[in-house]
Image (cartoon, helix red, strand yellow):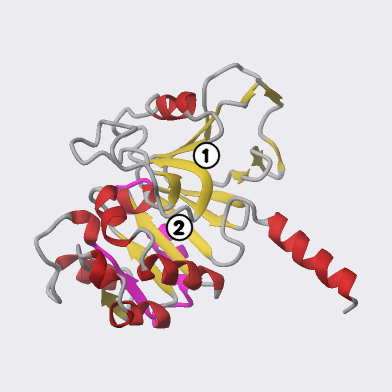
Amino acid sequence: MPLLLLLLSFALSASAQAVGPAHGSLVIVGGGLQDPSIWKRFVDLAGGPDAPIVVIPTAGGAKDYGADWEGLEQLRDVGMRNVTLLHTYDRRVADTEAFVEPLRRARGVWFPGGRQWRLADSYLDTKVHDELEKLLARGGVIGGSSAGATIQGDYLARGDTKSNTILMGDHEQGFAFVRGVAIDQHLLRRNRQFDLLEVIRAKPELLGVGIDEDTAIVVQGDAFEVIGNGYVAIYDAKRKIDSGGDFYLLAPGDHFDLAHRRALRGGRALERVVDR
């Protein structure tokens, strides 16, 4: 390939995925996961039931997690046959070659719920974080529910160590697998549909994504699809649906263009979107 075309190809590739992962997939669940189709999507994206999956339950805050942790059996019940548990609260351990070895073999990683600041404390900017990025780069999948959803965003909503009712607290940085985005969970079930407005008004450059229980967004590149049984709310300080609301809802089957902040239903724009 001529040098000019090669450089152009790299430039287009770099610009094409400005928000989501350039490779791999994210399955981001709003909590209360029951729908087997969401589990199936995660397993399929990992490569099937025999694909090596690493489960990181640190957000749950238990004193320790052993081989008898009941969450492992739950994951096996939904079809994962090759599951490894990985956990530490010690950043020094998380930053060692020995600890991250299972991640190098993994095709998928799952983060259960709890408090997202625990994941940030233990793994942000460590070798674990590096290996998660590498897993995506080789086409793997990272999934998570509740706290395991919010940690995948750039801005860490509800990251305060004192209370999960504080939207903007003492931890504000997530893993940023989806850049420029703040993710909230348990949206309608816990009447949180207005909560992300606080974050977006303070940081209008961010896109807010609120996900209801038993609902997920599947992110690939700069787009996501809504799956499951509930709704996803979009909060955008710069653009709005022309009904004038501060947020709008997407239903299962809808798609969203993260790069251009456009909602699609049946391949068409959901409604005319106007700049604020």
Type of amino acid at the residue the image marks with label 2: Val
Residue at position x 61%, y 62% in the image: 22
Q: Nearer the viewer, residue 2 or 110?
A: 2
Residue 219 lies in quadrant: bottom right
Residue 1 lies in quadrant: bottom right
Q: Is residue 248 above or below residue 66?
A: above
SS state under label 1: loop
Name the spot of residue 62 as percent of width and height, x first: 12, 59
Name the spot of residue 41 as percent of width and height, x first: 47, 64
Q: Indicate yes or no whether the magenta region holds residue 52.
A: yes
Residue 14 lies in quadrant: bottom right
SS state under label 2: strand
Q: Is residue 234 above or below residue 253?
A: above
Label 1: which residue? 251
Residue at position x 13%, y 73% in the image: 66
- Left or right of 234: which side holds 158? left
Mark 2 or 1, closer to the camera: 2
Looking at the rendered image, the quarter that the C terminus falls into is top right
Q: Nearer the viewer, residue 53 or 50?
A: 53
* Labels 2 and 1: the sequence-earlier one: 2
